[in-house]
Amino acid sequence: MNEQKAHVENMARNMRRTILDMSLAAGASSSHFGGGLSIVDIMASLFGAVMRYDPKNPEWDARDRFILSKGHGCLGYYAALAEIGLLSQVEIQSFETTGSILLGHPVMNRKKGIEFSTGSLGMGLSLGIGVAVAGQRRNRDYSVYVILGDGELNEGSNWEAIMAAPNFKLSNLVAIVDRNTFQQTGSNEEIMPIGDIAAKFSTFGWRTLEIDGHDVGALLEALTSPRGEQPTCIVAHTVKGKGFSFSEGDNDWHHKVLTKIQYEAGLEELGVVREDAS
């Protein structure tokens, strides 16, 4: 476990470097910086240790499926796909430029590891239920992982899905809530208090866990724990903008331009030593 944990933590550090690069490349278009960073440790745990996939055969039928329902977290998604070799550095540097396959929300491209187009919030969990039901009925043993935003839970369609999933006994479905307590224009408490998310999922019949979403050891333990017959919800408490002192917990970084000065400060905080540094 220690070796696996170290691998995931190193992957997360590399992903934060990639997010800096993509945000700088986006220039004046800006990027969803804060929400991408809050899910980095979750994504690194999934793609670095938990999920089953073959980068040489990205459409392998037995692969585990991943759906980023909170599409504005795409920086964390693209950085993970770069780490496993499904996205090249050329593609990463093209983020949000004309003709790029990497837009501000994910666009379905299974050869690149993107299962569905998302970004219209409230849709991802229903998609995940459909994929999980299909797996059960086709006697496939893959798992389906869906990351939801806590602000996204304002969407009523989520609660229809939360009610439906236990009815199908979807033990192959894992919903992970990125509980960073913010949404685009303010805190959850200011806009639409959501209360005890784990208790609410549990009331609908889900197996629920609640952890620190930046504790890789806790993430690995939760994601690999025995599931039983019901779907699992992991409420992961995170920090928006996690990883850089200028962005942590600051909702101004929901969608913002990264300056060259901030980029250099971010590299320094990651301990990156560049060959072109004097």
Image: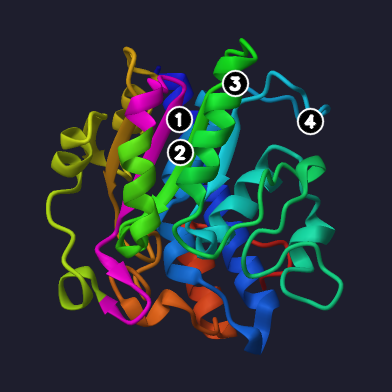
Say which of marks 4 and 3 sits in front: 3
**x and y percentages locating residue 125 in the rendered image:** 46, 45
- Looking at the image, do the residues carrying marks 2 and 1 touch, with CB atoms under 8 Å apart? yes
Tag count: 4
Q: Amino acid at mark 3?
A: Gly
Helix, strand or loop at label 3? It is helix
Q: CA distance from mark 2 to mark 1?
A: 5 Å
Q: Amino acid at mark 1?
A: Ala
Colour scheme in the image? rainbow
**Front-most of residues 213 and 141:** 141
Say which of marks 3 and 1 sits in front: 3
- Looking at the image, do the residues carrying marks 2 and 4 touch, with CB atoms under 8 Å apart? no
Say which of marks 2 and 4 sits in front: 4
For this view, does 210 lie left or right of residue 170? left
Q: Earlier in the sequence, mark 3 or mark 2?
A: 2
Q: In the image, which residues are magenta?
A: 165-186
Q: Quadrant of residue 260?
A: bottom right
- Residue lying at the far bottom in this picture: please name it: 28
Q: Which mark is residue 9?
A: 2
For label 3, the residue is 135
Q: Residues within 10 Å of mark 4 (few under 14, many from 20)?
A: some
- Let me know if residue 264 appears in the view: yes
For this view, does 265 lie left or right of residue 167? right
Q: Residues within 10 Å of mark 2 (few under 14, many from 20)?
A: many
Q: Amino acid at mark 2?
A: Glu
For label 4, the residue is 59
Residue placed at 53% from the left, 27% from the top? 132
- Let me know if residue 10 appears in the view: no
Helix, strand or loop at label 1? It is helix
Q: Which mark is residue 6?
A: 1
